[in-house]
Amino acid sequence: MSTPDAPLLVAEGLSKRYGQRIGCADVSLGIHEGEVVAVVGESGSGKSTLLGLLSTQLLPDAGNVRYRMRSGDERNLFALGEAERRFLLRTDWGFVHQDARLGLRMGVSAGGNVGERLMAVGWRHYGRIRAEAENWLERVEIARERIDDCPSAFSGGMRQRLQIAKNMVTRPRLIFMDEPTGGLDVSVQARLLDLIRSFVGDYGLAAVIVTHDLAVARLLSHRIIVMRHGRVIETGLTDQVLDDPREPYTQLLVASVLQV
Amino acid sequence: MSDAAHYNFAYLDEQTKRMIRRALLKAVAIPGYQVPFASREMPMPYGWGTGGVQVTASVLGPDDILKVIDQGADDTTNAVSIRKFFERTAGIATTTHTRDATVIQTRHRIPEAPLKEGQILVYQVPIPEPLRFLEPRETETRRQHALEDYGLMHVKLYEDIARHGHIATTYAYPVKVDDRYIMDPSPTPKFDNPKMDMCPALQLFGAGREKRIYALPPYTKVVSLDFEDHPFERTKFDRGCELCGAEGIYLDEVVTDDRGGCMYVCSDTDYCEGRRAAPHAAAPPIREARR
Amino acid sequence: MYVAVKGGEAAIAAAHALLDKERRGEPAIPELTTDQIREQLALAVDRVMCEGSLYDRDLAALAIKQARGDLIEAIFLVRAYRSTLPRFGYATPIDTGSMTIRRRISATFKDLPGGQVLGPTFDYTHRLLDDRRHGAAPVVQPLRKAVEDDAAVPHVSDLLGEQGLIEPNPRAVNDEAVGDLTRDPLSFPADRDLRLQSLSRGDEGLLLALGYSTQRGYGRTHPFAGEIRMGPVEVHFVPEELGFEVSLGTILVTECEMVNQFKGSAESPPQFTRGYGLTFGHCERKAMSMALVDRALRARELGEEVVAPAQDEEFVLSHTDNVQATGFVEHLKLPHYVDFQAELQLVRQMRCEWEAANRKEAAE
């Protein structure tokens, strides 16, 4: 058992290669409960590989990830059985994809999408499942009347909000987001970012957000990790790193944003 | 080669029967689990009962009495054809009476008369995988069964209710077996599902094309999936059989003219004939089953 | 009128009698013999043997006659017969390198050891209907040429292999037994031995369409017909009692080796890759299609992205068998009235509910 102020998730020496190419090299980090960490870098910097490894979608060549389960036990994630891993993924964790089609069942109604996790953990009362789905749709600002519509009929912004509702319904403690605002209009982005920010605050969520958009990182994250060529080159409190970057590469990233 | 005498008892060679019996034993040991088996080409087409025929061939002995039904009836063409096949290749006795049969091969129905201990009911199964139309990949559905990862099945039922106000599945209605595996009861109407629960007879399922065998040992718990507030409901007919007067049984709608005329008669022909031959001696119709 | 559904047994017997009559056709026309089919419809016989997985020209000819020329039905007859045959052992692998060449062509080299041998082929014929085929046309005797005793006909892939330009043929791991599709159910992911078996007895039409689709961009493999060879090969068997190899006779086979786009990595230099096709009899189109699909199905093994139907192992292997496919499609002819009754009742109920809801809405 560990103390509550110990990190929720600890990664040590994570490495992953794709043939000759380095996906991610010797990355270590810790995430505390309620803490939002942004991983930034250009495409090909290894941030998506890191997210895949942390969320057990990919297997590392070296290193491990430990996680403090709801029971309080600390477990090596790569030693979990497949059943345990899937259970963790659909209860204590969430995953918001840039492409909503990866996170939603496009031919299943919004209510069915949100209800799936509840049914998977044993809910068997239609009325209660539906009420809970309505409740979460409302919290992500999707009208109750849309509960029986399929996400294929939703706008891009609504799909992302539905993904969040689908994840939140089991009250996860940790949520992974891969470019959650990518490809959305600026005004839609702003509304989604507000929503994510309020959820993180209200529910004490920890989150790992992969983004190439430094503005998203500044708005949402407490801490920032800058990656390049598969390695972490700078890390620190978000405001500090963005206001006073030490590494020349980070300076370049920050400068290129300011010029726009 | 058309002479049946050239073939082994019940067509299949003994090695093949042993292989199928091993699969059957495994299936009985893990109720509801789909056991892969090396299905053979049979002299009838895939989809026409090759799985059921192979299972029947493997469990038949010379003293068995076989009944074959399709859609509940003994005289439907495919039932006749399969019954003939075993008469020719195994030379065994056949019957149309449910109570006299030791082995009953069926497509799409369970007889109305209660089955008893010692009887074997063999189902012909087209698609054994209850998750198939939710997830087409065998590799994924096998994993879902292994991990008891059945959320998707309930999503389907949820969608039915959201769309139609009730579960809009009338046949091949999925069941949970012995609190573990989700199983496809074969395309029997859901009316027959309650008969599978705690049935005294051994129930064997053979899918030839898909190469799977599964089983329900006698007295196995079989529960039709549902929601607490939308419980499983057996199909009800608001009338009885117009030939024998039986109620609470499954009816066929027979179109009698081209002006919308029709009559309703028992789907189970043996049950209907038995009642008409001896109206007072016939077993009382099974009323709405209680769960 | 209810008796109309009765009497299935008599109806079946009558239908089969009618079938016999139709099979015979006009009685004034001489009846076809199975010898004629075996000799003159040899390619149909080859296809039935190949997809029926049973090398017996006479049985295949009989099946074609019995099936009235419906080849899938004939394949089915042969397969059903095949399941009753006891299995007494497995032959040793045939050596197509020692084939007595009847046809051998390569599209990758203009000339090569052993030469290009056109053999009996439709290639370069003009597809013009020929009146002379109506009757008994005299057959021009083909030219004969003596085979040189030491005429080696090496596989094109071996010529490339000597220079390391093509990946070596995969070797069985530690003499691991080759799987048998007809004795063990296929499970996924399937190894290449089972994949090739499945393709070799798979439906020619499906393989042709899938192979074609890879050429049109759905899973491109950049194929070259490295070599197609056809001819008899000897089959050997080692009876346990004897402990040495005996010859069982010869079978006619067609083999196609595709040479496909190369791959390379830091560990291994760029090399061509292989696709393989083998059929009983002279089934050239099938052998070529099989080689295309085999190569497409190796996508996962070779680290290629799986994006097209021909690369999707579960999809391809689950649907290649035409006996399975035809059975399941045609089973829709069987009565389904019990299930249909249940659906009928549901539709009626749902229509009532819909009408009630509409009436209520109109009233409000």
Image: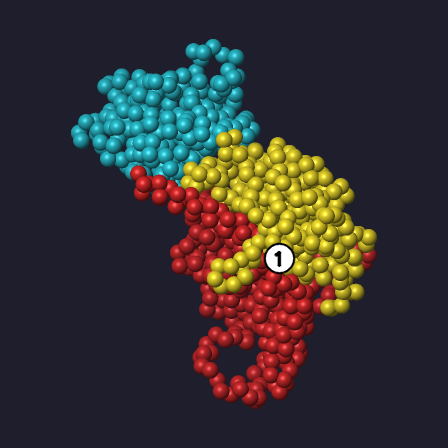
Chain C shade in the render: red
Of residues C174 and C41, which is closer to you in this image? C41
Q: Position of residue A111 (x, y in %)?
A: 40, 34
Residue A51 lies in what quarter of the image? top left
Of residues C270 and A51, which is closer to you in this image? A51
The outermost residue toward the left is A259
For the C terminus of chain C, which image quadrant? top left
Q: Position of residue C96 (x, y in %)?
A: 61, 63
Q: Would residue C274 be seen by someone viewing this image from the given angle?
A: no
In this picture, residue C108 sits left or right of residue A41: right
- Mark 1 sits on what residue? B48
| Amino acid found under the numbered disc labelled 1 | Trp
Residue A103 lies in what quarter of the image? top left
The outermost residue toward the front is B280
Q: Position of residue A190 (x, y in %)?
A: 24, 28
Residue A108, placed above or below residue C308: above
Q: Colour scheme of this structure image?
A: by chain
Chain B shade in the render: yellow
Q: Position of residue A222 (x, y in %)?
A: 32, 18
Q: Residue at 44% across / 25% down in the picture?
A: A170
Of residues A142 and B46, which is closer to you in this image? A142
Q: Residue at 40% across / 16% down in the picture?
A: A32
Chain A shade in the render: cyan
Dot 1 lies on which element?
A: loop
